[in-house]
């Protein structure tokens, strides 16, 4: 009798359906049981379990368990959907879902598996699609408390607020709006959309509130900037006898860190100890961050030493704390220790460390970190890319910053804002505006930070039209309540010559911080309104706003512009007695103020007593001596500056050459200019060239000045031609004055000073037709002559005078004294000069000239172009 031998053929290796099972799976294969397979599938909960899940699926198919119309087939298919979802095989999950029997599809479980899995994996559109399909399917059940939280989360991620509201109404109709899971998802959705009122309405409608629900609502307030409401809610939470957990304390500790609120942070630390939450990693890490940002680094170190060193977040927090407190060496040491402990830095570590290396000394280490990122394929997230771009821009390597940007696959608003700020920092305003327009073209919606980063570029370019467009965008998107945006708008309008609009924005601000006050004071000081700057400084003090070294520097600049040494001394007293210690820039501003007020002794004394000096302070004292024509002393200070290890820059040589021009020392000025270009390799800027023209012009060497202008490597600006025109008046060179004035009328056609100066030159030369021509030009171009004015400080009060002014209460006595002075001048042999008066008709008599002199500006010369 022949025996039939059953031969089991091995299937091809590429198919895993009949591959050998494990011991447990082999037992199931010997006697296929749906319940046994279900039990095995419960262990397939992660991607590494996928091969076993595939073999179980294959066994279910080959044994016919999935083909049964009744029995456990539906449960087995539902579990298979769950297995594929947990192992991230969504196509297979959808394939199994499509073959579900009608009875299994009537259960919410397979729908929930798919919606939950797609949401957790970030496939929010597909999650919402299956939710919609759930309503359209004839045998599908209604959504339950396990469905809606994930649907709401997907709506929030997609920004589909209208659909989220519809889901909310559905939850209310199904009686699920008071479910804690549904409620927490709705609260988060509304809070993320900035609708804190809607979030609070959902929260108040909850019948029961657990700690998670309280945390979600408080986190919404914190992220929405309403810290006061968050604190109030925290008090209500404690009153309701709901104990905070680690997430609660971590949330509020992060607020204390951001606000540098050490007192509240210490109280929360005490609370963490009371509830036994201090050992929680999240709480401990936030405590380290809080103490570091509150500049209590010793406390941060003590906590760090007590914590286990196996968490990367712990190391990142401590490294970031050292960087924020300027301890770069400690941050680098921690970075090395972390790697020695076996932990590899991630993008957060590197993004925290890179800001510490933004000077030239740390640039080499910054490039080494960039190399580490490339070699180890560290994930370049938004913050790491921004940090790399930032370090290259701050170290003046614009090309590398552009290379990093160009190599970035995904560009968002953070990276775009960093690029714009970097271009502005490097004086590339046009490139900043082009980047802004490019970001708009690629579909990136500007946020408040991007707008605030672009406005300084508009200010530098005097692009007021674009600035006004950005202002409109700010109003449209309700960004005007943010101080840094309004400060940027104020600065833009001020630099575009619209101080009125700048001050209007300032006056309408509901909340003004220190930066806002500083911006407005600086705008007044830089735009020739020192009195308003001083008045604003007084208001700032009266309102109790703390001033900083930036405030001091700005107000000292205003005092120098008056000049008002009395107020400058008051500010000096504030520096000595005040709560802040003046930095090198504030002390340099103090030197500049004393120098411009004519007190070189006090300027030099401040300089000598400075605890530390830099190039700015040296330039300030050299400029002070140079402005008084003390060339020898200025050059001596330059030599001392070099001996103490400081390098002269373009500002230093500008002050020195200007001093030579005022002192008439042409040869010394030429020597310094040659020293700057050849020895120091400093390329001359337009200011240096204007100073050289002034040097030749004041010495009467107008031909050399004209030749110097002709040999310039770039087109002369109004400052250069203005210096030449002024010299032509002094030396009565009408031919060159005609050339200079024609260029000035092209470059700055609305500056009345140029027309007045040219008219005076023509009057001195007896060319009255030229005088009439200037008047016609001014009339045709609608140029208004700005009246010149002078002021004098008497008994700590400034008195302002304009030509033929009679508004002063003591004007009668003043004019009486003036007549007496004129008689004394005439007795001493004074002869009036008609060239300093804006004359409109010929009159050669000395008596008439004296009458004109008294009638118009008398002792107050007409407006002239500053050299």
Image: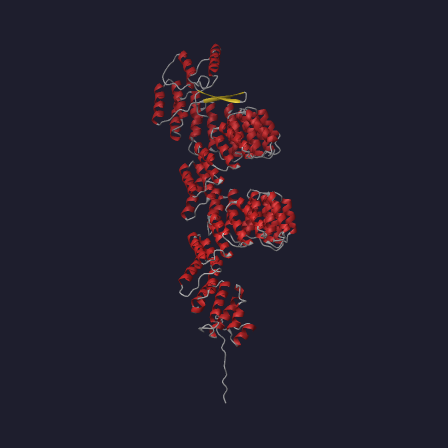
* Residue 592 higher or lower than 386, as above or below: above
Would residue 611 appear left or right of 497 to someone viewing this image?
A: right
Please tell me whether residue 32 is drawn above or below residue 602 in the rendered image. below
Q: Position of residue 852 (x, y in %)?
A: 41, 15
List the single residue furthest toward the bottom. Answer: 1
The answer to whether residue 794 shows anywhere in this view is yes
Residue 693 point in image, percent of width and height: 46, 27
Locate residue 40: give its quadrant: bottom right
> Which of these two is toward me, 849 or 802?
802
Using the rendered image of the protein, determine whether residue 491 is visible from the camera's viewpoint.
Answer: no
What kind of colouring is applied to the model shown? Answer: secondary structure
Number of residue marks? 0
When the figure is inspected, residue 723 is found, relative to residue 463, above or below; the finding is above
Rendered location of residue 17, percent (x, y) = 49, 72
**Residue 567 sits in which quadrant?**
top right
Q: Position of residue 495 (x, y in %)?
A: 45, 34
Residue at image coords 45%, 34%: 502
Question: Can you name the residue that lies furthest to the top here?
Answer: 827
Q: Nearer the viewer, residue 285 or 241?
A: 241
Q: Residue at coordinates 55% horizontally, 75% vertically from top-left?
A: 27
């Amino acid at each position: 009798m022949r025996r039939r031998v059953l031969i089991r053929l091995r299937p091809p290796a590429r198919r895993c359906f009949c591959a050998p099972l494990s011991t447990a799976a082999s037992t199931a294969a010997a006697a296929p049981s749906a319940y046994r397979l279900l039990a095995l599938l419960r262990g397939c909960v992660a991607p590494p379990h996928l091969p076993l899940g595939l073999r179980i699926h294959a066994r279910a198919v080959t044994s016919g368990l999935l083909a049964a119309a009744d029995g456990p087939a539906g449960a087995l298919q539902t579990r298979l959907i769950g297995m594929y979802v947990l192992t991230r095989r969504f196509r297979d999950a959808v394939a199994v879902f499509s073959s579900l029997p009608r009875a299994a599809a009537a259960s919410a479980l397979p729908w929930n598996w798919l919606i939950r899995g797609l949401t957790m994996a970030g496939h929010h559109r597909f999650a919402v699609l299956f939710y919609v399909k759930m309503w359209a399917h004839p045998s599908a059940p209604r959504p339950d408390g396990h469905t809606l939280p994930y649907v709401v989360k997907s709506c929030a991620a997609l920004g589909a607020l209208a659909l989220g509201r519809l889901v909310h109404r559905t939850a209310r109709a199904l009686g699920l709006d008071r479910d804690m899971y549904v409620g927490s998802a709705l609260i988060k959705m509304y809070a993320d959309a900035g609708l804190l009122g809607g979030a609070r309405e959902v929260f108040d409608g909850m019948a029961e509130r657990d700690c998670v629900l309280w945390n979600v609502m408080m986190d919404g307030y914190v992220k929405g900037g309403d810290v006061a409401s968050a604190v109030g809610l925290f008090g209500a939470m404690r009153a309701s006898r709901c104990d905070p957990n680690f997430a609660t304390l971590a949330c509020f500790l992060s607020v204390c860190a951001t606000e540098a609120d050490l007192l509240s942070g210490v109280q929360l630390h005490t609370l963490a100890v009371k509830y036994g939450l201090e050992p929680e990693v999240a709480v401990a890490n936030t405590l380290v961050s809080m103490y570091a940002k509150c500049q209590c680094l010793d406390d941060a170190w003590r906590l760090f030493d007590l914590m286990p060193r196996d968490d990367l977040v712990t190391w990142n927090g401590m490294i970031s704390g050292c960087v924020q407190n300027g301890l770069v060496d400690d941050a680098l040491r921690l970075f090395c220790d972390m790697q020695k402990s076996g932990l590899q830095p991630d993008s957060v570590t590197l993004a925290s460390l890179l800001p510490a290396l933004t000077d030239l000394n740390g640039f080499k280490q910054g490039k080494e970190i960039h190399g580490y990122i490339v070699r180890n394929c560290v994930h370049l997230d938004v913050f790491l890319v921004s940090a790399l771009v930032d370090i290259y821009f701050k170290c003046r390597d614009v090309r590398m910053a552009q290379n990093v940007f160009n190599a970035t696959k995904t560009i968002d608003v953070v990276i775009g804002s960093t690029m714009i700020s970097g271009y502005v920092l490097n004086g590339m305003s046009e490139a900043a505006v082009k980047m802004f327009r490019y970001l708009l073209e690629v579909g990136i919606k500007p946020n408040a930070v991007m707008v605030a980063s672009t406005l300084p570029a508009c200010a530098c370019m005097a692009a007021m039209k674009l600035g006004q467009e950005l202002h409109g965008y700010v109003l449209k998107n309700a960004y005007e309540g943010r101080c840094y945006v309004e400060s940027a708008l104020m600065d833009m309008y001020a630099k575009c010559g619209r101080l009125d609009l700048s001050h209007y924005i300032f006056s309408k601000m509901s909340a003004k911080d220190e930066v806002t006050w500083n911006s407005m004071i600086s705008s007044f000081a830089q735009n020739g309104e020192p009195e308003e700057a001083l008045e604003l400084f007084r208001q700032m003090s009266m309102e109790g706003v703390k001033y900083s070294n930036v405030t001091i520097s700005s107000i000292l600049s205003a005092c120098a512009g008056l000049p008002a040494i009395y107020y400058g001394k008051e500010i000096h007293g504030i520096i000595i007695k005040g709560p802040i210690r003046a930095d090198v820039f504030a002390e340099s501003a103090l030197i500049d103020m004393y120098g411009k007020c004519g007190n070189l002794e006090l300027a030099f004394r401040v300089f000598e007593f400075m605890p530390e000096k830099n190039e700015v302070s040296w330039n300030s004292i050299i400029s002070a001596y140079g402005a008084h024509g003390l060339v020898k002393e200025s050059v001596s200070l330059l030599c001392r500056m070099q001996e103490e290890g400081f390098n002269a820059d373009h500002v230093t040589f500008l002050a020195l050459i200007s001093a030579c021009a005022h002192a008439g020392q042409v040869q010394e000025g030429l020597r310094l200019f040659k020293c700057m270009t050849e020895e120091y390799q400093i390329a001359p800027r337009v200011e240096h060239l204007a100073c050289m023209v002034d040097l030749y012009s004041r010495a009467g060497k107008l031909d050399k000045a004209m030749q110097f202008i002709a040999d310039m490597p770039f087109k002369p600006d109004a400052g250069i031609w203005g210096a030449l025109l002024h010299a032509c008046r002094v030396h009565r060179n009408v031919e060159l004055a005609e050339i200079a004035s024609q260029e000035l009328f092209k470059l700055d056609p609305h500056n009345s000073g140029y027309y007045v100066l040219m008219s005076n030159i023509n009057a001195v030369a007896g060319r009255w037709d030229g005088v009439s021509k200037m008047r016609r030009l001014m009339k045709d171009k609608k140029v208004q002559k700005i009246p010149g004015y002078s002021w004098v400080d008497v008994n700590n009060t400034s008195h302002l005078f304009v030509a033929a002014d009679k508004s002063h209460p003591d004007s009668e006595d003043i004019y009486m004294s003036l007549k007496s002075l004129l008689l004394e001048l005439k007795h001493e042999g004074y002869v009036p000069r008609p060239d300093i008066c804006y004359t409109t008709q010929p009159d050669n008599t000395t008596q008439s000239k004296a009458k004109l002199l008294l009638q118009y500006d008398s002792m107050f010369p007409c407006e002239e172009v500053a050299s």
